[in-house]
Image (tube, rainbow, N blue to C red):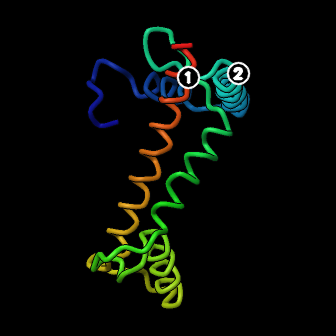
Amino acid sequence: MAFVSGLVSASRVRAMSASRACSPVRAASAKVARRASVLRMAEDGYEISDGKYFDSNPVVIALALVGWIVPSSLPVNIPLTGGKGLTPAFFASIQDNLSRWPKGPELGDPFWTLLVLFHLGMFATLIFGTIGYNLNKTLD
């Protein structure tokens, strides 16, 4: 509070600070408001742009996950994966790092590259699957 000029008294600064303090009632009402907005979003779908809502269909999500995990499990001749698919190489890397727990993976560990590649592909498949499902629904 050293930055407060001499025009504002110390008691006024304390009163302003106390009024900003979060009371349990205010915190609970904010929590209820957040929960209500999440529920409203779940009922309405996701608004992407121009008032168009995208549904989060669980079947599309399941198919997109299978559509990523199955092809990425096929063996390929890439030195990073050691001749295995991306998914088995990633899971083997997780298992290898867990065997050395509590010491985590180093920055040069291939685990980080596998982690980024696996998740980028998975989220891209989920996003494109949801977009394709919703666009197809709007074109019909």
| Extreme residue in the top direction | 50
Amino acid at dot 2? Glu
What is the x, y in percent for residue 86? 42, 69
Would residue 114 appear left or right of 47 to someone viewing this image?
left
Of residues 31 and 79, the one drawn nearer to the viewer in this rendering: 79
Secondary element under disc 2, as helix, strand or loop, is helix
User: Which of the 4 quarters of the picture holds residue 82?
Assistant: bottom left
Residue depicted at x 69% and y 29%:
35
- All told, the count of numbered labels is 2
Dot 2 corresponds to which residue? 43
Mark whose residue sits in front, 2 or 1: 1
Amino acid at dot 1? Phe
Residue depicted at x 63% and y 23%:
41
Dot 1 corresponds to which residue? 54
Quarter of the rendering occupied by the C terminus: top right
Mark 2 / mark 1, whichever is N-terminal: 2
Residue 9 seen in the current view: yes
